Image: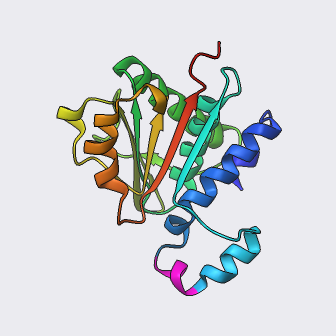
């Protein structure tokens, strides 16, 4: 599993990836999930499977880092991945994209994963790669309703979810996840815990 290539991950970060894995499992198996649901749950030790996940903990637990690693691994390993990350501000969303790009480089240069960058799909807010002819993409966007409505994908991630407005959740995030197989992952620092 590609996430294990990040050898400095803490036990807590590995638990976070299990939560992300559970939320996104339907996108790994695609059309085969329904027919194999019981087996998949049994193999993973799950009684239930939820497409929504929330990780909330104090600062310095490595939430942002592990999501950046998880996104890079998803792009490399899950055909058809289309990830959207919403951050409270543009600077944060650009930093997330830089982190994902650095993780992709690490996995390619140090561990030999093969991919090429998709032409015209790489800038401050987007990383697009091609793996075995399959294009995969991640967008890092500031949580601004007027410019992000209708953006979705196979997995939607809300960075610092507690800092995003209820209106943004209701008008942008919920319509892309309710009634779909889109995974939703929220990460947030416990508010007031510095």
Residue 155 on image: x %, y % = 44, 52
Q: Residue furthest left?
A: 146
Q: Position of residue 64 (x, y in %)?
A: 58, 30
Which residue occupies 52% across, 35% down?
100
Q: Nearer the viewer, residue 52 or 29?
A: 52
Q: Is the N terminus in the top left, top right, bottom left or bottom right quadrant?
A: bottom right
Q: Residue at the bottom extreme?
A: 35
Asked whether 124 falls inside the magenta stretch, the response is no
In percent of width and height, residue 24 lies at 54, 59
* Front in this rendered view, residue 143 or 123: 143
Q: In this rendering, would 45 be left or right of 193?
A: right
In the rendered view, would you say 32 is above or below 84? below
* Image coloring type: rainbow
Q: Which residues are magenta?
A: 31-35
Q: Is residue 177 above or below residue 146?
A: below
> Which residue is at the front of the view, 126 or 33?
33
- Visible in this render: residue 6? no
In this view, 194 is above or below 76: above
Dominant SS in magenta: helix
Q: Decide: is 123 above or below 53.
A: above
- Whether residue 149 is visible, yes or no, is yes
Q: Quadrant of the C terminus?
A: top right
**Count of marks, rendered view:** 0
Question: In the figure, residue 134 lies in which quadrant?
Answer: bottom left
The residue at the point 64 percent across, 36 percent down is 66
Q: Residue at x 58, y 38 (%)?
A: 67
Residue at image point 36% right, 46% down: 118
Could you say where residue 36 lies in the image, as x and y percent from the top left? Answer: 60, 84
Place residue 110 in its image quadrant: top right
Q: Which quadrant of the structure image shows residue 138?
A: top left
């Amino acid at each position: 599993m590609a996430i294990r290539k990040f050898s400095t991950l803490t036990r807590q970060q590995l638990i976070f990836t299990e939560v992300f894995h559970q939320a996104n499992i339907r996108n790994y198996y695609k059309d085969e999930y329904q027919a194999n649901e019981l087996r998949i749950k049994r193999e993973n030790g799950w009684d239930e499977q939820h497409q929504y996940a929330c990780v909330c903990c104090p600062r310095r637990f490595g939430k942002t880092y592990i999501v950046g690693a998880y996104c890079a691994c998803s792009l490399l390993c899950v055909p058809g991945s289309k990830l959207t990350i919403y951050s409270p501000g543009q600077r944060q969303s650009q930093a997330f994209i830089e982190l994902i790009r650095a993780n992709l480089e690490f996995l390619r240069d140090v561990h030999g994963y093969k991919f090429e960058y998709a032409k015209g799909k790489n800038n401050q807010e987007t990383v697009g790669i091609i793996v075995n002819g399959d294009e995969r993409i991640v967008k890092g966007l500031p949580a601004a309703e007027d410019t992000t409505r209708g953006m979705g994908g196979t997995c939607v991630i809300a960075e610092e979810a507690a800092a995003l407005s209820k209106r943004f959740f209701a008008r942008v995030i919920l319509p892309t996840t309710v009634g779909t197989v889109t995974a939703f992952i929220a990460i947030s620092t416990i508010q007031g815990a510095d």
